[in-house]
Amino acid sequence: MIFQRNEKTDNNIRRIADLFGRKDKIYIYLANRDISNQFLKDAEKEGFHFGDEISPTEREPDEVMAVYKNRELCYLSWAGHLFFYQKKCKIPRIDYERYVNGERRYIYQKR
């Protein structure tokens, strides 16, 4: 595993902010519409926003989102999408559905 998440919060909910460790940027994989909507709601609750200060739920999700430690969300360019799917990608890739479901192995694996 590239990094370890911090302990769960008091109410046993995994938070996005717990994913960073020493990294400043992570990629979040969103497998379907339901998990995408959940991610946007969770991100908004934790104070994440897009670079123009728009809240997450005011925008449509993409299959892969870049998330920064400074609580900024970004869409990936086509080149970013290509990079995400390559094995040599050094940026941590999180399968958000696995993460919020409490799975221990939540690093993205091609399905």
Image: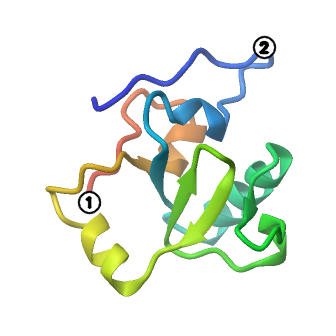
Quarter-of-image position of residue 75: bottom right
What is the tally of numbered marks visible in this picture? 2
Residue linked to disc 1: 110
Image coords of residue 91 (percent x, y): 33, 50
The residue at the far bottom in this view is 78
Cβ atoms under marks 1 and 2 closer than 8 Å? no
Residue type at mark 2: give it: Asp
Residue type at mark 1: give it: Lys
- Tell me if 73 is positioned left or right of 30 in this view: right
Image coords of residue 111 (percent x, y): 29, 60
Quarter-of-image position of residue 110: bottom left
Residue linked to disc 2: 10
- Tell me if 32 is positioned left or right of 17 in this view: left
Q: Is residue 84 above or below residue 97?
A: below
Which structural element holds mark 2? loop
Q: Nearer the viewer, residue 33 or 3?
A: 3
Q: Nearer the viewer, residue 20 or 106?
A: 20
Task: Give the mark nearest the N terminus, 1 or 2.
Answer: 2
Q: CA distance from mark 1 to mark 2?
A: 32 Å
